[in-house]
Image (cartoon, rainbow, N blue to C red):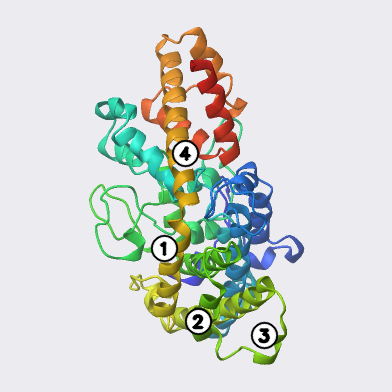
């Protein structure tokens, strides 16, 4: 892979090449990506989607929107620092093509901003709930009518693939979704493969999948435009990662490790004493002991340690990336950056205590159970009504139910796979609160 190709400004539908040296620096294409994402309805809905504590009204707790903004900030820093070093290493990128160090930061920031844009309500349990509706619920009836890969898309519903659809899928009157630059789409694509075969290797890029069958053609177009390295054969499609996808992943890893831990402490689920014990190894080279001891509130003390810890991890991630940049460009780095961090053991310790005290807390489990029930009910109600309408057997109730769909989801799909994925897409873009409201409406009608 080469950086000029990887930094493509091309957008879906372009008929001519976009050159960096011809860009208006006051309205740079990569920054346009950020703007389009932040103004999108799908991004806005993240303000009422679970990060750790579902449906929590506690001021301390992060939701998907605040988490995404924080990941974007960390990603921008990672991108800018790496960009500065890449430009120094390959000066022709700037001298000939006009690329700047901050371009890297803009790409990573936009991709990081959208990294959770396809996640369903109720956190990762939402993904599992959608998959289990088809795998073990009433959705099992559709299996014999779908191809193996189409079925796998549904039973292993993946937020990353759904996010690619949000960013890039055409719909009635809107070609190319948000029309994001191919460079940003490449950085977004953490798992550039289709749903089958599952985990064919231990490489980080094969851990999950990154696109649905309906988006396959455009996904391959983006990958080829960027010069990503194909790593599958026959009818299977998969690629090595875009190098900047490693930075997006690192930004997410850093934020959820440190900030979920911070949430746990501020909520009283983790004792404050753990903060210094677990974070001190990350911040020992930068902590101002006098300043720390002068901080009066727990919130301020934890905030100070969190900021120092994130700074340490950013610098370490950059070091790992640059040490392995040649291998990454060759498609020969099968790890996440933080897996090779000098702080890997400390991060694992923090994650384990968060799992025990936060992710497995009674409140989280109760809300995840609720999420399963809600998502199963919504999928069953809307999939049944939507397919009955296509088959000409819809009842008056089915017709009324479909009127609850937003206007852009009321268009019919002839193909069963497209219809089922269409409803999954609708449910996935609901906020936690809207999903609960719809569920109550449907249940009230049944009682």
**Who is closer to the viewer here, 273 or 435?**
273
Q: Earlier in the sequence, mark 4 or mark 3?
A: 3
Q: Earlier in the sequence, mark 1 or mark 3?
A: 3
Q: Residue drawn at (76%, 63%), measured in percent from left and top?
A: 26
Q: Residues within 10 Å of mark 2 (few under 14, many from 20)?
A: few
Q: Secondary structure at mark 1?
A: helix
Q: Position of residue 309 (x, y in %)?
A: 56, 79
**Mark 2 — residue?**
277
Q: Residue drawn at (51%, 11%), measured in percent from left and top?
A: 397
Q: CA distance from mark 1 to mark 3?
A: 27 Å
The quadrant of the image that shows the N terminus is bottom left
The mark found on residue 370 in the picture is 4
Residue 218: in sight, yes or no? no
Q: Residue drawn at (57%, 65%), measured in percent from left and top?
A: 108
Q: CA distance from mark 2 to mark 3?
A: 14 Å
Q: Secondary structure at mark 4?
A: helix
Farthest right residue?
26
**Mark 1 — residue?**
356
Q: Residue drawn at (59%, 30%), measured in percent from left and top?
A: 437
Q: Residues within 10 Å of mark 1 (few under 14, many from 20)?
A: few
Instruction: Place residue 101 in its image quadrant.
Output: bottom right
**Mark 3 — residue?**
292
Q: CA distance from mark 2 to mark 4?
A: 35 Å
Depicted 303 relative to depicted 422: above or below: below
Q: Is residue 150 left or right of residue 61?
A: left
Q: Secondary structure at mark 2?
A: helix
Depicted 394 relative to depicted 113: above or below: above
């Amino acid at each position: 892979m080469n950086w000029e190709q990887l930094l493509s400004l091309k957008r879906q539908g372009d008929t001519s090449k976009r050159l960096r040296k011809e860009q208006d620096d006051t309205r740079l294409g990569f920054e346009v990506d950020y703007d389009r994402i932040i103004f999108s309805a799908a991004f806005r809905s993240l303000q009422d989607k679970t990060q750790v504590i579902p449906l929590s009204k506690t001021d301390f707790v992060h939701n998907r929107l605040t988490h995404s903004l924080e990941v974007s900030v960390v990603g921008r820093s990672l991108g800018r620092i790496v960009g500065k070093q890449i430009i120094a290493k390959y000066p022709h990128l700037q001298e000939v093509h006009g690329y700047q160090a901050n371009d890297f930061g803009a790409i990573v920031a936009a991709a990081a901003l959208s990294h959770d844009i396809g996640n369903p309500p109720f956190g990762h349990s939402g993904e599992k709930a959608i998959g289990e509706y088809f795998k073990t619920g009433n959705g099992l009836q559709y299996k014999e009518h779908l191809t193996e890969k189409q079925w796998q898309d549904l039973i292993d519903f993946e937020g990353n693939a759904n996010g690619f659809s949000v960013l890039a899928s055409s719909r009635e009157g809107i070609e190319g979704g948000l029309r994001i630059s191919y460079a940003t789409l490449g950085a977004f694509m953490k798992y550039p493969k289709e749903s089958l075969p599952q985990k064919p290797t231990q490489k980080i890029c094969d851990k999950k999948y990154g696109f649905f069958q309906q988006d396959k053609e455009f996904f391959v177009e983006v990958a080829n435009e960027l010069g990503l390295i194909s790593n599958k054969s026959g009818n299977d499609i998969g690629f090595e990662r875009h190098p900047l996808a490693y930075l997006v992943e690192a930004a997410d890893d850093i934020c959820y490790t440190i900030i979920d831990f911070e949430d746990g402490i501020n909520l009283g689920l983790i004792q404050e004493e753990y903060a210094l014990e677990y974070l001190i190894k990350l911040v020992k080279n930068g902590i101002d002991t006098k300043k720390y001891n002068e901080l009066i509130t727990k919130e301020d003390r934890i905030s100070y340690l969190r900021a120092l810890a994130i700074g340490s991890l950013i610098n370490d991630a950059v070091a790992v990336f640059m040490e392995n940049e040649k291998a990454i460009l060759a498609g020969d780095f099968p790890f996440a950056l933080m897996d090779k961090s000098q702080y890997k053991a400390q991060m694992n310790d923090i994650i384990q205590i968060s799992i025990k005290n936060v992710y497995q807390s009674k409140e989280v489990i109760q809300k995840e159970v609720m999420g399963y029930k809600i998502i199963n009910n919504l999928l069953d109600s809307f999939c049944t009504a939507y397919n009955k309408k296509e088959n000409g057997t819809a009842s008056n109730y089915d017709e009324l139910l479909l009127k609850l769909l937003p206007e852009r989801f009321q268009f019919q799909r002839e193909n069963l796979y497209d219809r089922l994925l269409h409803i999954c897409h609708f449910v996935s873009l609901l906020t936690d609160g809207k999903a609960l409201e719809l569920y109550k409406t449907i249940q009230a009608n049944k009682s």
